Image (cartoon, rainbow, N blue to C red):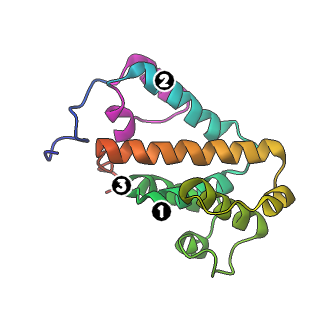
Amino acid sequence: MDSGSISRIPVAPLPSSASRRLAAVGRDPINLHRALAHAPALLAPLLDLIHALRFDAQVSRSLRELMICRIAQLEGSEYELAHHLPMAASSGLDSEQVRSIVGWREASCFSAPQRAVLGYAEHIGAGAPRDDEALDACFSPVEQTELTVTGATYLAIARMLRALDVRIDDLLA
């Protein structure tokens, strides 16, 4: 990757449909969007899914960000962590919680729902055993479905970022 590129493939113009989708939710394009711009028919539904997870889910934003950050840690996705650790902090997680995500099992700063999310992230991202009792005690079927889609989506995104070698956005680096 040369110093002017954002990924291992050349930059493509962002499709107008993606620009409109991003503008509709008040977002600027990021390197992930630019890297996927070569495939506008795939970028569009991915943006729709990400926006539905971000704006239409019942599960609290802080729990979704906790899920995303743990998945990113498991995948070694510095790009996702650069974007989502600040989002986790702004969604209501305190600094001790943000620092303790990686060692959450030993940390005493997480609630039962947060611990259930972190355990479920490890199930989705690393194949750890799933704790159905903890999930059922904390989340409805709708919420468990949202957490499943959130985790699986960001696992896929982390792998896309790695495969395309997408550079962390300059504003975050």
Q: Amino acid at mark 3?
A: Leu
From the viewer's perspective, is 95 left or right of 3?
right
Identity of the residue drawn at 47% across and 62% down: 73
Residue 117: x and y, percent?
69, 60
From the viewer's perspective, is 140 left or right of 83?
right
Residue 6, above or below 41: below
Residue 18: x and y, percent?
44, 23
Is disc 3 surrounded by few (<14), some (14 to 19) or many (20+) residues within 10 Å?
A: few
Q: Say which residue label 3 marks.
A: 172
Residue 34: x and y, percent?
33, 33
Queried whether the magenta region covers residue 31, the answer comes back as: yes
Comparing 120 with 37, the one in front is 120
Q: Amino acid at mark 1?
A: Gln
Queried whether the magenta region covers residue 26, the answer comes back as: yes
- Where does the N terminus fall, quadrant-wise? top left
Q: Amino acid at mark 2?
A: Ala
Mark 1–mark 2 Cα distance, whole angstroms, equals: 26 Å
Q: Earlier in the sequence, mark 2 or mark 3?
A: 2
Is disc 2 surrounded by few (<14), some (14 to 19) or many (20+) residues within 10 Å?
A: some
Q: Earlier in the sequence, mark 1 or mark 3?
A: 1
Residue 103: x and y, percent?
56, 76
Comparing 2 with 171, the one in front is 2
Task: In the rendered structure, find residue 73 and report the number of the disc placed on it.
Answer: 1
Residue 129, above or below 35: below
From the viewer's perspective, is 25 left or right of 115?
left
Secondary structure, mark 1, is helix
Comparing 158 with 3, the one in front is 158
Task: In the rendered structure, find residue 44 and report the number of the disc placed on it.
Answer: 2
Q: Visible in this render: residue 90?
A: no
